[in-house]
Image (tube, grey):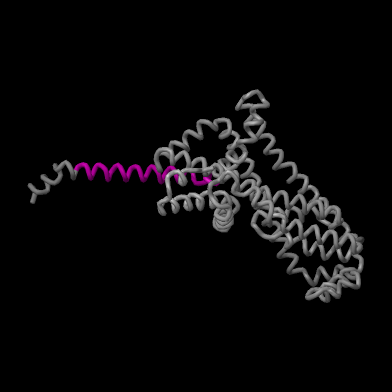
Amino acid sequence: MTTEATSDSNNPSTANAIDAFVKLVVLSLLLACCFLIMHPFIMLMVWAIVIAVAIYPVYLKLRSVLGGKDGLAATVFVLLGIALLLLPTLALGGSLVDSMIDLSGRLNEGALDIPPPPDKVADWPLIGESLSHTWTLASTNIDGVLEDFAPQLKSIAAWLLYAVGGVVMSLIQFVISVIIAGALLANAEGGHRVFRAIAARLIGGDKGENVVLMSTNTIRSVALGVLGVALVQSILAAIGLVLADVPGAEILALIVLLLAIMQLPPLLILLPAALYVFSAESTGVAVAFAVWSVFVSVSDSFLKPLLLGRGVDVPMFVILIGAIGGMLVWGVIGLFVGAVMLALGYKTFRIWLGESQQELEGAG
């Protein structure tokens, strides 16, 4: 038995297998440790890569204006990005705080005057009668209404506090991601070489380059086709809300932006606003705002075909499904990750079907 055991240990194939196993275990431990160390920064890095890839064409123009200096261009980009994030947020936050302070003061002084509802509010389907009753009670006894709805108001206040905390944390993460994106842009050529080398190792040859190109174009396509369209819809909604003199137009426009990013119709917000305009403004203004609201809600039907899928040899429907599905799984960042993953899956499926090499490698 001893002789057999010694013989096995001296067998070159056995020794090589043990050596490979030990190396594999050590490598696995190293990768696990690296993952644990980088785990808190993964989401920041993903966002930074998405921002850098999406903004790179604009960055090239900025760098050209600044004399081709990468460091200066990246610094200007970071400062502009932080300003675009912080200034509107601070302005909106300040407006909300001022409004809440003013509302609280008027409630404490008993100076909050709520006009009675128009008679036609009671004729609204489903909610008209109950809304008219509550509105009438609020116009005569606001304290009684607040007491009746105290539990609901506490729940709403708690949810708003939680939402504000989430917004603040997201804002901090975005600021850090913008800073990282600036560093990536300053070293864009080196980063591109790294990703191209990784893709070449995983896939091989020109196919790796095509995968990098397709991933880049997909990210930019989603940035234009989803986020860009959502931004356009929110701006159009804000114009209509301001012109119709709807209270809290800035907040409602922000909610429209979030709904559009989540691929939900802006009409979810604009329809209640239209009902308010019908009760508070003339019929002409109300009809014009209602038509404008419908136009804003359906505008994505002709904007997305123009912007989504541009430069990508993948059907727009695949990109859109990948973006929506990715968002449902991973949140907003899933818009990009999901679109890229499904696009890669689509190309792999085409390869499996055995299409010609020329068709398969055309990435846009």
In the image, residue 315 lies at what x, y percent? Answer: 55, 52
Please tell me which residue is depicted at 83% across the width and 70% down the height of the picture: 145
Q: x, y (%) of residue 205? A: 40, 38
Q: How many labels does the image show?
A: 0
Q: Nearer the viewer, residue 83 or 274?
A: 274
Question: Left or right: 76 with respect to 31?
Answer: right
Q: Can residue 100 be seen by looking at this rendering?
A: no
Confirm whether residue 206 shows in the render: yes
> Which residue is more in the foreground, 84 or 155?
84
Per the picture, the main secondary structure of the magenta-coloured stretch is helix
Q: Residue visible at 81% across and 51% down?
A: 239
Residue pictured at 86% horizontal, 75% vertical: 122
Write down the quadrant of residue 118 in the picture: bottom right
Query: Where does residue 41 sit, x and y in percent of width and height?
Result: 53, 44
**Which stretch did the figure color magenta?**
15-43
Give the position of the C terminus as an image quadrant: top right
| Image-based side of 145 in relation to 152, left or right | right
Where in the figure is residue 225, as x and y percent of width and height? 64, 49
Query: In the picture provided, is 107 more to the left or to the right than 330?
Result: right
Q: Is 16 within the magenta?
A: yes
Quadrant of the rendered structure where residue 299 is?
bottom right
**Is 321 in the magenta?**
no
